[in-house]
Image: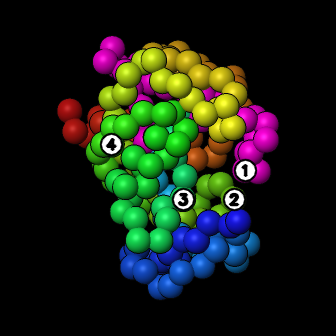
Amino acid sequence: MDELVERVDGQDRVLGVVSRRQAIREGWLHRVAVTVCRDDRGRILVHRRSEQLSRFPGLHEVVVGGAVAVGESYEQAAARELAEELGIRVLPRLLFTFLNRSGLSPHRLGVHEAVVPDAVVPSPDEVAWHGWLTEPELGSALLEWRFTPNSHEAFSRYLAFRSAQS
């Protein structure tokens, strides 16, 4: 069954409820929540998507996440996705949102950060491989490996956000 999402306008105000498949097909804005996961040493979790996934099978990702369901906040969706994909229960912190035009269709992307245990147990239905990379290692991987469009856009904005905060 297709997920139901809230169609939103450019200011992130809800316009109505639609299927995610329809939102993507029509190019309607909807919400997506992702989290950059760090361990207590500052390394970043990177994973490769399962080949069975309908969206971006086999590509690497720097973020963990998915669509925000009807009635959910960005934070609730991010926490749900972390539980579903990594088997962990943490409360990610929303850093910022932006209109993201990369990927399958435009969407409002809520970027979160969370410190997570390095012993995550990813769902094999979602994650084919995972590992922890330092920022320099991740910089090299972003140039050499195939990543989802959201990974490049979200991570570059995440780094700019962190730089502005220091």
The earlier-in-sequence mark between 4 and 2 is 4
The earlier-in-sequence mark between 1 and 2 is 1
- Circle 3 Cα neighbour tier, 10 Å, few/some/many (<14 / 14–19 / ≥20): many
- Circle 1 Cα neighbour tier, 10 Å, few/some/many (<14 / 14–19 / ≥20): few
Kindly indicate the quadrant of the structure image that contains residue 115: top left
Q: Nearer the viewer, residue 150 or 82?
A: 82
Find out whether residue 40 is within the magenta segment: yes
> In 3D space, how far apart are the residues under numbered discs 1 and 2 (Cα atoms)?
8 Å
**Circle 2 sits in a helix, a strand or a loop, which is it?**
loop
Residue 104, numbered label? 2
The earlier-in-sequence mark between 3 and 1 is 1
The earlier-in-sequence mark between 2 and 3 is 3
> In 3D space, how far apart are the residues under numbered discs 3 and 1 (Cα atoms)?
12 Å
Residue that mark 4 sits on: 92
**Circle 3 sits in a helix, a strand or a loop, which is it?**
strand
Residue drawn at point x = 50 percent, y = 85 percent: 16
Residue 67, numbered label? 3
Which residue range is magenta in the image? 35-61
**Circle 4 sits in a helix, a strand or a loop, which is it?**
loop
Q: Amino acid at mark 2?
A: Leu
Residue that mark 1 sits on: 55
Mark 1 and mark 2 residues within 8 Å of each other at the beta carbon: yes
Whether residue 70 sits left or right of residue 54 in the image: it is left
Q: Amino acid at mark 1?
A: Arg
Q: Position of residue 48 (x, y in %)?
A: 66, 30
**Circle 1 sits in a helix, a strand or a loop, which is it?**
loop
Note whether 3 is above or below 127 in the view shown.
below
Q: Position of residue 145 (x, y in %)?
A: 69, 26
> In 3D space, how far apart are the residues under numbered discs 2 and 3 (Cα atoms)?
12 Å
Closest to the camera, between mark 1 and mark 2, is: 1
